[in-house]
Amino acid sequence: MNNLFSYLVELNISLMILFVAYKLFFEKDKNFMIRRIYLLSVVILPMILPLLPVSLRMPVGNMVPVTISLEEITIFGTGSASEGTTPFPFTNILLVIYLLVLSLGLIKVMMQLARILHAIITSERFEAEGVSLIANPGLHASSFFGYIFIDPASAENESFSHILEHEKNHKREWHSIDRILVELFVMINWFNPVAWMFRRSVIENLEYLADSAVLRRGTDPMKYQLSILNQYIGSASISNQFSSQIKNRINMLNKNYKLGSRWKLTLLFPLTVIAFFFVSCTEKEKAITIEEPETETIEPAEEISAEIVEEEVFFIVEEMPTFNGGEPATEFRKYIAQNLQYPEIAIEKGVNGRVILQFAVNKTGQVVDAVVVRSVDPALDKESIRVVLSSPKWTPGKQHGKVVKVLFTFPINFVL
């Protein structure tokens, strides 16, 4: 659950960065195809960035990009039946609200799809200007993938050819894919006003694309604008109906914006890096470092600290560190399972999740520099750090016959 909230926060940070860049660099650009490619990238990239491996998103200065990952261990916790009613955590309330609104949004999308499917199955077909059309006054002039819906009564109007050409362009360029993707995207991020602004920009741009295609065929701009004004359009849906943006479409037809260059798409790389940086920073803020207890220090603390600062950290060495005479993947996991306790406060709050730690085994075999790179809850983080730092000495690793400091990553999964 905490991982879900963390993912949504990171996703929306990336979305806001990329959308601000769209408003600055693309909104007054008449290269609508380039705008379409960028907007589709805004749908995809924010979904991917938070899913990148933790090893690529370590806090700067504390972490390094490659480590040895130990196999995850799961710790189970149970509450006492005599404690009475278990309190319902606030995070659970937020989760229920989020999933409820998400479900309502998805139901709405499914109902729109069902309405379109019903129209495709039940409506009559007719042909105009060599194109097979579906007669359905309820959907008015719209398209959905390979289908075009038009009110047969409008076929007698002078503007009919303009309307038909507009919808044919939606059909040819598969604009329905954009509409479905953005509807699903905005449902996932329904709580973020920027997501709804982004949806509006996607829909607007698809209309601009279709309008510009009509004008490129030699249509008189004034007559086409009159066709837009005279066209009766119902409420917007994922089948490219767009009544609320008629004014913007006419304004765009009259603007003298320059046709932008393709080089603007190269902005995606630095913008992605910036979004990646901010996502990484959110991880860094959540990282918790707990110093090794003095009782665990056998040698003078000052000497060890100086050695830690100066010595080089290795990730893979010729002779890997061992624990209790065996492989860390088995022996160290056994030690953790026997000594780690599910914090009572976490059980009372109903907190569970996956804590990811990083620690180093130094030249003397001590576990040092333990840090949480994926946080769940302070109580779980603190207990994870405690048990790892209280580990008995390891047999240190060796590189070219010399003992060296080696870094490990270790996930601990807390489950109620």
Image (spheres, rainbow, N blue to C red):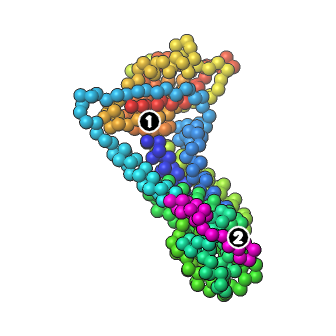
Indicate the quadrant where residue 53 lies: top right
| Residue at 59% across, 65% down | 122
Disc 2 crowd, CA 10 A, few/some/many (<14, 14-19, 20+)? few
For the residue pair 272 and 344, the one nearer the viewer reads as: 344
Q: Horizontal and vertical percent for residue 249?
A: 60, 77
Which type of secondary structure does the marked residue at label 2 adopt? strand
Which type of secondary structure does the marked residue at label 1 adopt? strand
Quadrant showing the C terminus: top left
Q: Horizontal and vertical percent for residue 197?
A: 51, 65
Amino acid, disc 2: Ser
For the residue pair 10 and 119, the one nearer the viewer reads as: 119
Indicate the quadrant where residue 250 lies: bottom right
Q: Horizontal and vertical percent for residue 276?
A: 58, 49
Q: Which residue is mark 2?
A: 132
Q: Which residue is mark 1?
A: 353
In reply to whether residue 118 is colored magenta, the answer given is yes
The magenta span reads: 111-132
Mark pair 2, 1: CA separation: 55 Å
Q: Nearer the viewer, mark 2 or mark 1?
A: 2
For the residue pair 183 and 123, the one nearer the viewer reads as: 123
